[in-house]
């Protein structure tokens, strides 16, 4: 929380400092091809892996207890949430603890504004998640998904 608070005091013009702090959060050095626009929110960082040429727009939330893997050349729009953890559905067990499952995002994926991806989901390479979608199931490579819950709309056009 200390690191995300420090990131959130910066602006896009402070990109080298944003990179340095985000790298500190993840425990790795971020390349110059990484960009993030604050604010950014996270429950950790140690369980997040980010590939090359990744762009994360403002006001995103990453809950990485279950692990978040982001491939190369991924675009993440504003207000996107990647949430790997939740609670048991059974009311008698709900306060017993947290259940966590990983999120895996393939290379060259675009996650549009306001989308939410839930733990246990794999997003295949070249896929697009439409604005406002709530992704609760795997997304096949090269497909566009939309809605709540997200459903496959069509293949992403090449070119």
Image (tube, rainbow, N blue to C red):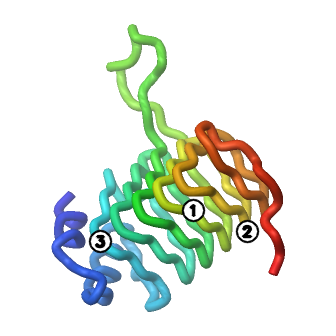
Tell me if 69 is positioned left or right of 78 in this view. right
Mark 2 vs mark 3: which is more N-terminal? 3
Mark 2 vs mark 1: which is more N-terminal? 1
Task: Please say if the residues under marks 1 and 3 sit with CB atoms less than 8 Å apart.
Answer: no
Identify the residue under disc 2: 126
Q: Quadrant of the N terminus?
A: bottom left
Q: Give the x, y percent position of residue 68.
A: 51, 56
Residue 95 - label: none
Q: Relative to residue 54, is residue 139 depicted above or below?
A: above
Label 3 Cα neighbours within 10 Å, binned few <14 / some 14-19 / many ≥20: many
Mark 1 vs mark 3: which is more N-terminal? 3
Q: CA distance from mark 2 to mark 1?
A: 10 Å
Q: Quadrant of the C terminus?
A: bottom right
Q: CA distance from mark 1 to mark 3?
A: 17 Å
Identify the residue under disc 3: 38
Identify the residue under disc 1: 111
Element class at badge 3: loop
Q: Residue at x 58, y 72 (%)?
A: 74
Residue 102 shows in the view: no
115 vs 41, nearest the viewer: 115
Q: CA distance from mark 2 to mark 3?
A: 25 Å
Q: Residue at x 65, y 43 (%)?
A: 150
Q: Residue furthest top?
A: 92
Q: Residue at x 81, y 55 (%)?
A: 154
Element class at badge 1: strand
Tell me if 54 is positioned left or right of 92 in this view. right
Q: Relative to residue 147, is residue 44 depicted above or below?
A: below
């Amino acid at each position: 929380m200390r690191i995300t608070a420090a990131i959130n005091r910066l602006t896009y013009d402070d990109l080298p400092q944003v990179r340095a702090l985000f790298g500190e959060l993840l425990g790795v050095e971020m390349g110059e091809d990484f960009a993030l626009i604050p604010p950014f929110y996270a429950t950790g960082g140690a369980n997040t892996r980010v590939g090359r040429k990744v762009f994360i727009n403002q006001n995103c939330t990453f809950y990485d207890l279950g692990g978040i893997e982001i491939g190369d050349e991924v675009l993440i729009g504003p207000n996107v949430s990647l949430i790997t953890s939740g609670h048991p559905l059974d009311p008698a067990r709900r306060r017993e603890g947290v259940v966590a499952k990983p999120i895996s995002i393939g290379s060259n994926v675009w996650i549009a504004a306001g989308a939410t991806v839930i733990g246990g989901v794999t997003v295949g390479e070249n896929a697009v998640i439409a604005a406002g979608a709530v992704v609760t199931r795997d997304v096949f490579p090269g497909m566009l998904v939309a809605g709540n819950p997200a459903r496959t709309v069509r293949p992403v056009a090449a070119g």
